[in-house]
Image (cartoon, helix red, strand yellow):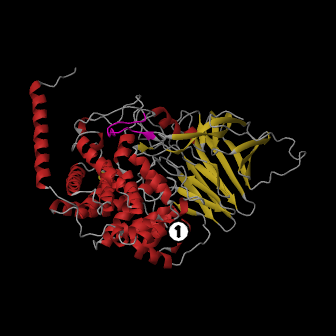
Amino acid sequence: MKYKTSRSFRSLEQDLRVCLLRKLRRNARANTVSQLRDDIQFFGLDEWRDQKQELKLALVEDAGISLAGFRAKADSYCAHVFDLLGSGPVRLGDHIDWHQDFKSGARWEPKYFKQIKEIELGDASDIKVPWELSRCHHFVSLGIAYWLTEKEKYAAEFVSQCRDWIERNPPYHGVNWHCAMEVAIRAINWIWGYYLFAGSPQFDTQTRAAMACSLATHGEYIWNNLEFDKRVTEGRYVRHNGNHYISDLIGLIYLGLVLPGQDPNRWLRNGLEELDREMQVQVLPDGVHWELSPSYHRLVLELVLPAVILCSRNNIPVPQIIKQKCEAMLEYTKHYLKPDGLCPLVRDADDGRVYHLDDNDYRDHRHLLALGGAFFARGDFLGRAGRFSGEIIWMLGPIGLEKAKRLPVSNSPMTSHDFPEAGFYVLRGPDQAHIFVSCADIGMKGTYGGHAHNDCLSFELGYEGRSFITDCGTYAYSGDPASRNQFRSTASHNTARVDAVEINQFDEDVLFGMHSDAKPKVLEWRKEVDFDLLRAEHFGYTRLLEPVVHQRCFLLDRISKRFQIEDLFEGSGEHLFELFFHFSPGVELAQVADRSFEASVTGVTILLEFSDEGNWNVRLEEGWVSERYGRKRRGWTLVVASRQAVPAGLMTSIQLGVRRNGTSDDRALISEPIAMKESGKPV
């Protein structure tokens, strides 16, 4: 039986909302501020303010940043042209609609934030689009362009957009007040904008006061809507938070530092205390953030490390464990990055950033290694970064930059490394051979798979600076539920599927969540001078009527430059086994024999051979790879399949560095390389 809410209860709800709004107005009046504090050091800005020419020289020569690129980007923002989350350049008109997903056209009405529905399956709306726009990363770009050119048009645009945003996004109303994380990241970028434009006559007293008051409201909102969670684990309540809560705390730390008053002091103090507790939980002993996504690992590090630096510059004590965890996270970053500086496409990646102080690829995380190397005096981090970054220049100032230049840089060859708490393993060989293997659970110690993919025992492989075998990426969240589920499925990873069943179950209507079925277990890890050996298994298919355990062994022979994979399936019954090998966009495939394929890209070739035991057949399929959120490109997929009774097995051998300059007789069995257009059709 359905019950209707009575008129009296509806009135009570309305009265409570009126009382809340009255309280907000009282708080706003009580916390009215006319400006942000001018007695703090906001990173290195004060040191650079009278050294603009030296700043430009450092950005170009030390960080390799294109000043013309920054100006062009700022000019596009002045024209209200944005390229967000795969949209391509889109002009948003004379008046920006801050409440619209301009990719799908969907719009959220500016009603009370708790009445807003975040996800509407099937209408193609993606709430991340208005959120990304209202993070206001472009305020920093406008500010940098202003510093580089001293043209007031950038300040005028900043002031116009800031005042427009405040007018069209009343406190606690609309999509941009729906999530504390978004409020926090916006606050950080607004603070950057405030101090970058502090010397502009366009940034008048009235605008400063409006911005400062709004930032105070940002702090109140975050404080009252912290994304904190506890869950029962092994009979007791434990902290169960992720990057959202870290974002909230960092927002409070920034706001607590730049705003005057007792409330901001409380935000700063409690923010640091809570961050101390959370870093001990969220960062595993091996330095991996426990959501187990390299991209979200980067986001958390990009949140915490600059906040530590900002506090240190202002003589605010930071708990030592936070610094230690940041350094451990950088150690992991140093190892997971490929030789070209890009991170593997492992698990969720939504292009999330805290700020934009450079023009690097979203997947390039070396800016954090550079900043961490300079701050912690780690020459190995600086060596792996390969260059200084905009973060060093802007955050550490000219003095910090000169100190970084005097540090001895270590360029020792990268070696294989294990991260057993997380379940990630990095195998390295000669000629920049780089293999990233996932033996990880769904994240948060197997309790929640919000950003998990079905990638158990999957791997990525690169050689001589080229990506050959890759994870397929993320592509979409709520804007395309079908693609969301496709890209996190077993078939989109370089692992095995049994009877067309997922390794870990997930509800297709629950876009952020996955059951912990696999329970992966590493059986052996050996790192020797000549080879690496990794053997692991998972139990995701033991829930089948006739259970199956999948065991996989990886062997990298550094002498022969050969990478071998042995798959073994044990259990009972007859099953359909499928093994997937996804190739990066641009890789050409040529079949050289019934079970042998050459994969080539820009003059470098590897050879894949599959054993002929067990009636396995090999087929070539078109696939998709998403290297950036909202974008996807065609790539080839090899599927090796067989229906047979267990025990069953397959041996895959990948020879690295194959010559393709044989005579025509030598290549009698070799077909022409298969290239692929962007449309996905062979050419």
- Residue range of the region highlighted in magenta in the rendering: 90-103
Q: Is residue 77 left or right of residue 464?
A: left
Residue 639 vertical position relative to residue 521 in the rendered view, above or below: above
Q: Which residue is drawn at the image coordinates 91% and 45% (left, top)? A: 665
**Residue 455 visible here:** yes
In this rendering, the answer to whether 79 lies above or below 400 is: above
Residue 327 visible (yes or no):
no
Please identify the dominant SS of the magenta region: loop
Which residue does the numbered mark 1 point to in the structure image?
61
Q: Magenta stretch: residue 94 in it?
A: yes
The percent position of residue 88, horizontal first and vertical second, equals 49, 41
Q: Secondary structure at mark 1?
A: helix
Q: Is residue 418 left or right of residue 533?
A: left
The residue drawn where x is 34% and y is 46% is 134
> How far across and down, in percent of the image, does residue 667 sit?
86, 45
> What quarter of the picture does the N terminus occupy?
top left
* Quadrant hosting residue 110: top left
How many discs mark residues in the rendered view?
1
Residue 622: x and y in percent read 64, 35
